[in-house]
Amino acid sequence: MPRLTLILATLITLAALPASAECFADYKAKQDDPLRLHYGVAQVSDAACAGGSDPGAEIAPRLAGDGWQLLNVLSVFGPEGLEERRSSAGEYFLRF
């Protein structure tokens, strides 16, 4: 019976957690001919924040659709890091 209690307590705890945490990445991208560079912030999956997936693999296709090439992902972070990056990202803040 204690095992069942533990399982039920675990399930109740998991059900109380938010379904999806907010996860973001900041990155650098470029376009060629003429060369253009930009710094941006994009939302990525929770798995990217947990280290279970590559945030670059999520961002690169979005950028490519608008003619940009991902250079690198600088960091991944939660909502607490958004405001400090907003002005630096400018028009590329949550655009892709």
Image (cartoon, rainbow, N blue to C red):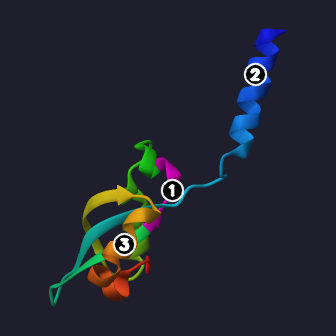
Q: Nearer the viewer, residue 24 or 31?
A: 24
Q: Looking at the image, which residue is at 46% across and 67% down?
A: 43
Inter-mark Cα distance, 3 to 2: 39 Å
Residue identifier under label 3: 41
Under circle 3, the secondary element is strand
Amino acid type shown at disc 2: Ile
Horizontal arrangement in the rendering, residue 31 relative to residue 61 (left or right): left
Q: Position of residue 62 (x, y in %)?
A: 43, 72
Residue identifier under label 1: 45
- Magenta-colored span: 43-47
Under circle 2, the secondary element is helix
Amino acid type shown at disc 1: Ser
Look at the picture and state if 31 lies above or below 41.
below
Residue identifier under label 2: 7
Q: Looking at the image, which residue is at 70% across and 36% down?
A: 13
Labels 3 and 2: the sequence-earlier one = 2
